[in-house]
Amino acid sequence: MKTKLSALLILASCTASYSELSLAGDVTVYGKANINYNSIDIDGDPGIDADGNPIDNPDKWDLNSAASRLGFKGSEQITEHLKAIFKIEFEVAIDGSDSDDALKRRNSYVGLQGNWGTILGGNHDSPLKISQGKIDLFNDLRYGDIANVFVGENRDNDIIMYTTPQFGGFAATVGITPGDTDENHNDDGPADAVSSTVYYTGDKLYAAIAYDSNVNKNNIFRATSTYHLGNFKLGAMYQYAEESQDDAGLGKVKGLIDVADDYYGVVFSEMEGGMVSISYQLNNWLFKGQTAIANYENDDGNTDVSLTSVGVDYKFTKRTKLYSYYTYSKMDQSADLGITADLEANVVGTIGLEHKF
């Protein structure tokens, strides 16, 4: 259950040097603890692990913190039609990881909201990433997330975003990012990267189109739709991406495409792909599956990468669920690219537990 704490109590506990604080408004403290136990079998020649490093035996078990998080959000009414909003959120590696990901920023911002819409600035998922809605049934799972196949799953620093009010179910979001001067591309303007989406939300249908222009030096078009049919939910996505600046390469992707980059030294300049997902709700049970495939290419050749996942969730309560899943990914060999063997990864998420608060 989300706990409402006054800003007075939070700041007083963190700032002992101030004897008196008089601040209005409430802060919501929220979070999610999510952990899963996985069996990983990666086949390739030579053996490689999920991070693309050569090892003698690529098979292993791991306990993985799946985007567990802790956050604070709130608002302050300024006038009848205007309020200030904020959010500060961190990902927490509850598996005890001592890597760079043990504690990292998630969506964090400050902004204003009124009947004209919402404007905010900070660190936030790009509008293109937001446009996927709930199509990814294995979101936040390290080995099942669609970020293992598609570029564009960006959380952008220094982003300014504006979202319109809804008109008949339609709304739009645009985000701009000022450039950082660099010796190769000289991005130094007020809005060198732009991400935008227009979407429709109805009782049964969600649909969105989105476009990134020079975000992480990529141009990306994405179309997404989900539809509720009784206890079924169906989803489909199409995406095309290309580098926006010569020799910049496509943005980072997890999984086997990351292996191609890190181990084989292959940098891709273009991709095209799609995915479908389906789920069925039966009382407290949710049965789900999805498959995604993409073709990556550069001037030397191309390769296909695919990711298929199936799983089942059981909800004890609205906030707590137990789950299990299986995911299989494959990247086809391509002699032109220097990839000399099919790379395959089988991951069995034997058991996982998620609790929201």
Image: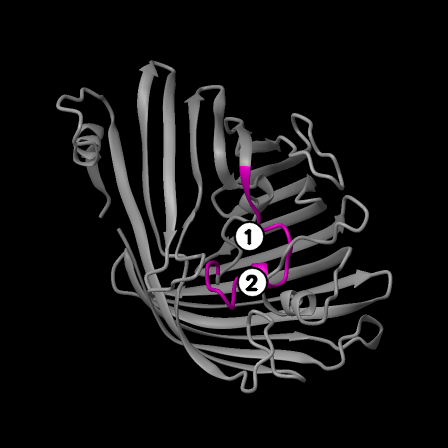
Placement of 12 over or under 281, stated as above or below: above
Q: Which residues are magenta?
A: 139-157
Residue 13, position in %: x, y?
17, 36
Residue at image coords 37%, 23%: 84
Give the residue type that dot 1 points to: Thr
Q: Nearer the viewer, residue 106 or 13?
A: 13
- Residue 226 is labelled as 1
The question of residue 141 being in magenta is answered with yes
Check the image and name the residue furthest to the bottom: 57
The reply to whether discs 2 and 1 touch (Cβ–Cβ < 8 Å) is: yes
Residue 90, position in %: x, y?
38, 47
Pointer 2: what residue? 277
Q: How is the image coloured?
A: one colour
- Residue 326 is labelled as none
Check the image and name the residue furthest to the top: 79
Q: Quadrant of residue 199?
A: top right
Q: Nearer the viewer, residue 318 or 341?
A: 341
Check the image and name the residue furthest to the left: 19
Compute the Cα span from label 2 to label 1: 9 Å
The question of residue 98 being in magenta is answered with no
Residue at image coords 79%, 62%: 297
Mark 2 and mark 1 lie on one chain; the one further toward the N terminus is 1
Placement of 351 over or under 212, stated as above or below: below
Residue 30, position in %: x, y?
29, 45
Residue 229, position in %: x, y?
50, 57
Placement of 259 over or under 202, stated as above or below: below
Placement of 87 over or under 234, stated as above or below: above
Secondary structure type for disc 1: strand
